[in-house]
Image (cartoon, helix red, strand yellow):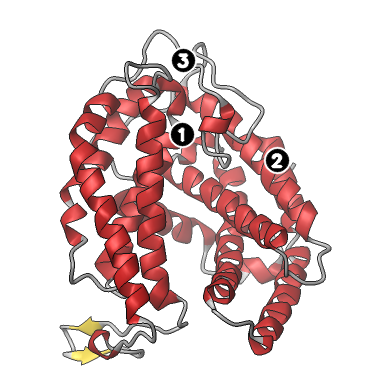
Amino acid sequence: MRIPSHRAVSTRAPVNQQHVTEQKKLASDQYEGNQVVGLKGTMSNLARAKLLPLMDRVIEESSILTENAQPHDPRVKAYRKKIAALRFHLDLLAPVYPAEGANGDQWTQIRELLDSGYEAIGSFKDRFDAQGLQLAQFDQRTNSWSEGVRPDDVEYKRPDKVRADRETMLTWRASFDAEASAARDFLANPLDERLADRKRDDQSRFWWGGVHARAKIKHNAGKNLRRLAKGVTKDALDDFDTIKDEGKIRGHHEEERVHDLRKRMRNLRNLFTVYPELLDDTDRIQAMEILRPAVDRYGNFGDLLTRRALKSKSSKKLDKVIDRQWDELIAWSRENKLKKHLQALAKDL
């Protein structure tokens, strides 16, 4: 089933060119591998080709995290994205790594290590992001700064908290550096003849840990990932149905479902960007037409929720901003038929 594009979405730049541009950007900046692997092969072959180059980048660039690192440093944000890229493929390819071992489930240990790093760096980075400031960029061609606050002018009201978050981040780096070699050796040896029998609770609830489908050894990588994507899409629909009639987002449960919906849509967008052949051209273009703006809009709203959560005192002014933005976000979702697009995507998969 295909949903006609709404005029509010179709006013964007031409879809084909924009999709190609975004595909190249994500493929080169976030999910690159040294080999091109088709989805007609096995999941274990895909794991070998994708995970090792990503792991190497995370290992090589951990030196970015230093005692002088600042929350507004773009390199810190870029490094966190590389961790996300590695974690992304680790989650997708979890079934080809054994759940048993002399020291327990090493896949789970690596996943937890990456997750703690992602969270630690995120908390550090949020000290700047929560201020709602735009960081100015220096253009060497024009010898001038763009709009925004210059790096040397950024100030933090609670430098003690910045130091504490930095220390947490550096503690993680030390743990990661110590375990990186063994982790890489493990990732270099996926299962070929069977798939792991790993509990759902030990996997990401945004991927295999949250869907009913299970990977099957008889299926190639493409069919297994399509089954996974279908389950994630259904979970995103459940998230939307849960929150769409909420007049205000106040409690932790409601906030978490908003964040969950955004994460699942972001995962789907990234999946179809990295592996566009999971859908035919028409279905992929229509999926990306709604997923791109939806991820951006729900992400911006999620940033407001994070900003409120980091405040030591409640702010009625910020609450009013969030309430207004929520009304606008739900109105946009209904106007652009977000639910019907997700339903169509689940059927196409």
Mark 2 vs mark 1: which is more N-terminal?
1
Mark 3 vs mark 1: which is more N-terminal?
1
**Residue holding disc 2:** 234
Give the number of the disc on residue 195.
Answer: 3
- Seen in the image, is 109 located left or right of residue 79? right
Task: Determine the residue located farthest toward the top in the rendered image.
Answer: 193
- Seen in the image, is 163 located left or right of residue 199? left
Q: Position of residue 342 (x, y in %)?
A: 70, 48
Please report the residue visible at 35 percent of the width from the left and 42 percent of the height from the top.
113
Under mark 2, the amino acid is Lys
Residue 190 or residue 110, whichever sits in front? 110
Under mark 3, the amino acid is Leu
**Residue holding disc 1:** 92
Residue 227 or residue 12, whichever sits in front? 227
Mark 2 vs mark 3: which is more N-terminal?
3
Q: Quadrant of the N terminus?
A: top right
Badge 1: residue crowd in 10 Å (few <14, some 14–19, many ≥20): many
Q: Position of residue 13 (x, y in %)?
A: 51, 68
Q: How many marks?
A: 3
Q: Are marks 3 and 1 in contact (CB under 8 Å)?
A: no
Q: Position of residue 244 (x, y in %)?
A: 79, 61
Under mark 1, the amino acid is Leu
Between the residue at mark 2 and the residue at mark 3, the CA separation in whole angstroms equals: 24 Å
Please report the residue visible at 42 percent of the width from the left and 55 percent of the height from the top.
119
Q: Position of residue 122 (x, y in %)?
A: 40, 62
Q: Quadrant of the C terminus?
A: top right
